[in-house]
Image (cartoon, grey):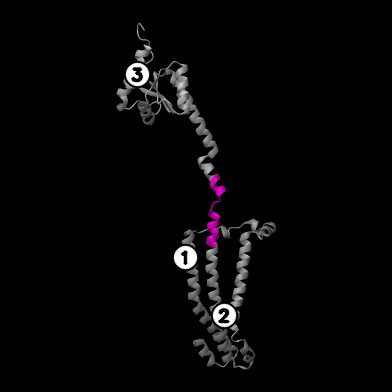
């Protein structure tokens, strides 16, 4: 407003035109400086909020590849370049449309501007043309900046989001191939089963359910404080334990409650639980009487 009043009180000459232009420039600069400063601070704050405070000199570091025309031509067809081109075209169209919206209400006045005094013409151009265009352009740029921020955020999250195949590959690298690990576990179970079966012939007795469970026990006085479980199994494994036991003459005793308790409470290599001492001792005593052997497989003297 001060500039307009100043222009209205001046006779427009070469010197006064320069003075008026400088005043107009300073007025525009002082009016727009807070807006530009706010945009600058907002841009920096938004970047810091997204990725933290990061200083990189990569963009200004000399790079011969930037002068390579073949590299530049190839980059033209990158998705990011196509998106940037689209955004720039959108800005041009949006700014043009914003300027048109600011001017369309005054288009009918333009033919009559030629006859206006310079001061009146200046007032018309500033108040009815320049400032409305500037306001609309700023609004358009704010809208574009918001959309661009949303798009950049979406693109960033898309880049860091791993595909299902990438997740599988990473899992394979950190945990190993599931098929290989499954095969290894299968081999480990088979080796453990073979070691367990090798202990059955050295056992003193196999206690059975008789159809579902089988538990082999061994007791060596002086070496063990309680009978030890040498093998156990259910269903097919139990059948295999019984088969090996019969092949090597290991006594088999049917006692479902003791067999179930031993199967559920122990693993091969464990000592039997205290609450089963009495029941197992009676079974072993019965076996030793029938076989004429001492604990540990030794022959009873005179047997």
- Predominant secondary structure in magenta? helix
From the image, state whether disc 2 or disc 3 is nearer to you: 3
Nearer to the camera, 293 or 105: 293
Q: Is residue 82 magenta?
A: no
Compared with 105, 286 (above or below) is: above
> Does residue 195 appear in this view?
no
Mark 3 vs 1, N-terminal side: 1
Answer with the quarter of the image where residue 90 lies: bottom right
From the image, state whether disc 2 or disc 1 is nearer to you: 2
The residue at which mark 1 appears reads as: 45
Query: Which region of the structure is painted magenta?
Result: 152-168
> Does residue 121 appear in this view?
yes
Badge number at residue 133 = 2
**Are the residues at dot 3 and dot 1 in contact (C-beta closer than 8 Å)?**
no
Badge number at residue 68 = none
The C terminus: image quadrant = top left
The residue at which mark 3 appears reads as: 284
Compared with 171, 94 (above or below) is: below
């Amino acid at each position: 407003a001060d500039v307009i009043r100043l222009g209205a009180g001046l006779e427009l000459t070469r010197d006064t035109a320069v003075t008026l232009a400088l005043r107009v420039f300073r007025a525009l600069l002082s009016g727009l400086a807070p807006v530009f400063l706010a945009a600058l601070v907002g841009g920096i704050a938004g970047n810091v909020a997204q990725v933290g405070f990061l200083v990189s000199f990569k963009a200004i570091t000399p790079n011969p590849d930037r002068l390579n025309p073949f590299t530049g031509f190839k980059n033209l067809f990158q998705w990011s370049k196509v998106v940037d081109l689209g955004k720039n075209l959108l800005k041009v169209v949006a700014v043009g449309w914003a300027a048109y919206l600011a001017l369309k209400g005054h288009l009918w006045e333009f033919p009559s501007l030629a006859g206006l005094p310079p001061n009146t013409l200046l007032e018309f151009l500033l108040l009815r043309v320049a400032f409305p265009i500037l306001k609309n352009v700023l609004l358009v740029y704010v809208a574009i900046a918001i959309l661009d921020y949303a798009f950049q955020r979406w693109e960033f999250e898309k880049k860091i989001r791993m595909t299902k195949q990438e997740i599988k590959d990473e899992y394979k690298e950190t945990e190993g191939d599931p098929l290989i690990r499954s095969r290894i576990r299968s081999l480990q179970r088979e080796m453990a089963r073979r070691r367990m079966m090798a202990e059955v012939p050295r056992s003193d007795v196999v206690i059975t359910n008789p159809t579902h469970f089988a538990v082999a026990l061994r007791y060596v006085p002086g070496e063990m404080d309680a009978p030890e479980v040498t093998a156990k199994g259910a269903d097919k494994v139990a059948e295999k334990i019984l088969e090996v036991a019969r092949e090597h003459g290991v006594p088999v005793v049917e006692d479902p409650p003791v067999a179930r308790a031993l199967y559920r409470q122990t693993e091969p290599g464990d000592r039997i639980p205290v609450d089963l001492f009495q029941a197992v001792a009676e079974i072993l005593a019965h076996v030793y009487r029938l076989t004429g052997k001492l604990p540990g497989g030794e022959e009873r003297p005179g047997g």
